[in-house]
Amino acid sequence: MASTLTNRKAASSKASSPASTVVEADIPKYIVPDISVKDLLGAIPQHCHERSFFRSSLYVVWDFAWLGIFLYTATTQIPKINPENISLPHPALYKVARGAAWLFYDFCAGLVGTGLWVIAHECGHQAYSTSKLANNTVGWLLHSALGVPYHSWRITHGKHHAQTSHLTGDQVFVPKTRTERGLPPLNAEKENLEGTKVSLDLQEIFSEALEDAPIMSVVWLTAQLALGWPLYLIRNATGQRSYPRFTNHFAPKGPLFAPHQFTDIIISDIGVFIWMACLAYAFKTYGFLNVFRIYFLPYLWVNHWLVLITFLQHTDPALPHYQASAFTFPRGALSTFDRELMGGPGIIGKITGWICATATHGISETHVAHHICSKIPHYNAWEARDAINARLARDGIHVQGNPGTWSEALRVIRECKFIEDEGEVRFYKNAQGKAARVPVFSSEGVSDSGVDLQ
């Protein structure tokens, strides 16, 4: 995918000065999908929809077993890194080695903890079992243990599924427009709406206004991975900007929720309050350092993985965003990418990709299938993904993105700066005002999402 984005043929048109020279790029076309919900669902084998409480619960036990193994190994083996058991060249290296071992534990526990987060997320989609009570009970317990308001996020996440990439309806990773970025209005003499023509002087203006320095992109990515998730819950960061200030996932009478959902939001808040009380008790009883390295750092890793995975699923210069007039549920579902989490070429990439996919239950690798039918449990999503991809290939639609890595996230941040203020189908433009795709309609059609937001 990345190679197709970078292989652009540039040609200069005649202009009065080098600065006003309009550079035109040969950009690939994006055929806007015109496929029905029925067609997409019909491609999925019927048995993929089967949900099993017992089988789903085995994955919960599996994840907790691994967390127990990691914790036991860390608490019994890391203290043995001392002069009595190991010979190191300098006394200070023992403390460094113990610190590095704890950081490795934190990484591993955070990765497996993300798997539990994914299962709780499936509970919110009623994919854990056929029992709504079992789904919501397990989901509330698991998400509360990770500081997540279960029902609150379940509700807004359902809206996200119903209106993925809908410019005024989606709930998260909503792109900022030219105006919101404070950029000059579209100048038809120096650029075009599609982003295939941009003059050199405008490119320079865009680059300065959007702070395209690599170090700024690294800083922004680090901040997003570290703080993005709690800021989304607390202040609607990256969400719809049409919501009033201080919109959050904890106010039962807030704009995110309907009046009949009041009790669910209170139940979610109680779960988070219990979590905070348990943390306070643990810090007081077991000491700050013990709780910090055993639970809190893995918790931060979970938040990091959540943001990295979802950001890359929904953000890429090759993914479209739709105005209401052009939006359909299938178009929204297909405006996402499957990505191999921490995968890559070579044996190392295959090993890390397999480990991360297994630990996180394929949430990154089967994301498009999940958007097409969110009630499919993760253990059936792999087969559903392959069946859907075979059907999409007949229409020339491909939804496999680059591996989901930190370097890919940095590339995406640098390529996805703003979208235009107008247009039925819009693609991100980079810091030079250039787009990576030009939308082309094959035909028109509307579909009902069929997503239950109750």
Image (spheres, helix red, strand yellow):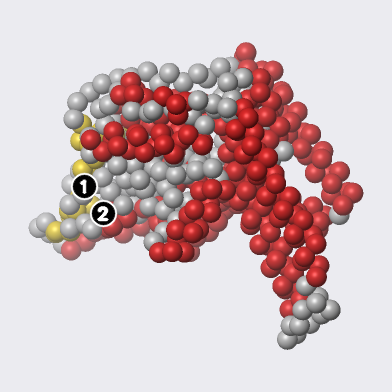
Residue at position x 77%, y 79% in the image: 86
Determine the residue positioned at 44% across, 39% down.
Answer: 382
Q: Quadrant of residue 324?
A: top left
Circle 2 — which element?
A: helix
N-terminal of the pair, mark 1 or mark 2, is 2
Q: Kindly identify which residue carries mark 2.
A: 4
The three-letter code of the residue at mark 1 reads Pro
Describe residue 168's horizontal placement relative to residue 399 as left or right: right
230 or 91: nearer the viewer: 91
Image coords of residue 45 (percent x, y): 39, 28
Quarter residue 41 falls in: top left
Q: How far separated are the C-alphas under marks 1 and 2?
A: 8 Å
**Residue 92 vertical placement versus 204 (above, below):** below
Above or below residue 283? Residue 118 is: above
In the image, which disc is placed on residue 28? 1
Q: Is residue 317 left or right of residue 290?
A: left
The kind of residue on which mark 2 rests is Thr
Secondary structure category for the residue under label 1: loop
